[in-house]
């Protein structure tokens, strides 16, 4: 996946540390910014495809992205077994 979309990210308007919060309040702040971002979906996919472990990407925390990846693996396994 190309990264040209990054130029349109709302995150460019903020210091990078906003998206690498140290507490829950920081996570919520970053997620609010991402909620208004026109490229949040592409950002999330980029983080998932590249196994990015840290920070808020596409409005999702590290824990949320791990959960999404687990769910995708389960669905993929289930779909393969169903055929």
Image (cartoon, rainbow, N blue to C red):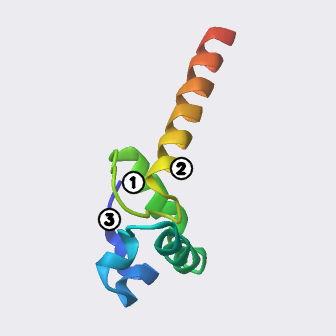
Cα separation between marks 1 and 3? 11 Å
> How many numbered badges does the structure rendering display?
3
User: If you read the primary sequence from the N terminus, does the residue marked by circle 3 or circle 2 appear first?
Assistant: 3
Q: In the drawing, does residue 54 fall left or right of residue 76?
A: left
Residue pictured at 38% horizontal, 90% vertical: 13
Q: Which residue is mark 2?
A: 64
Residue that carries the numbered disc 1 in the rendered image: 47
Q: Residues within 10 Å of mark 3 (few under 14, many from 20)?
A: few
Q: How far separated are the C-alphas under marks 1 and 2?
A: 11 Å
Q: Residue at x 64, y 17 (%)?
A: 78
Image coordinates for residue 61, horizontal then vertical, percent: 48, 57
Q: Secondary structure at mark 1?
A: helix
Towards the viewer: 50 or 19: 19
Among the two numbered marks 1 and 2 on one chain, the one whose residue lies closer to the N terminus: 1
- Occupied quadrant, residue 31: bottom right
Q: Are marks 1 and 2 in contact (CB under 8 Å)?
A: no
| Disc 1 to disc 3: CB gap under 8 Å | no
Badge nearest the viewer, 1 or 3: 1
- Identify the residue at the far right of this view: 82
How far is mark 3 from mark 2, CA to CA?
22 Å
Q: Is residue 83 left or right of residue 77?
A: right
Residue carrying label 3: 3
Coordinates of residue 37 in the picture (x, y in percent): 54, 78
Asked if labels 2 and 3 touch by Cβ distance under 8 angstroms, the answer is: no
Residue 6: x percent and y percent?
A: 36, 73
**Residue 7 image offset from top left, x and y in percent:** 35, 80
Q: Looking at this view, is 33 or 40 the one in front?
A: 33
Q: Secondary structure at mark 2?
A: helix
Q: Secondary structure at mark 3?
A: loop
């Amino acid at each position: 996946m190309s990264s040209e979309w990054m130029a349109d990210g709302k995150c460019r308007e903020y210091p990078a540390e906003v998206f690498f919060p140290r507490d829950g309040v920081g996570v919520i702040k970053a997620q609010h910014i991402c909620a208004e971002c026109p490229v949040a979906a592409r950002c999330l996919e980029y983080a998932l495809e590249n196994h990015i472990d840290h920070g808020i990407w596409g409005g999702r925390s590290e824990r949320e992205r791990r959960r999404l990846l687990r769910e995708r693996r389960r669905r993929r396994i289930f779909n393969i077994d169903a055929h």
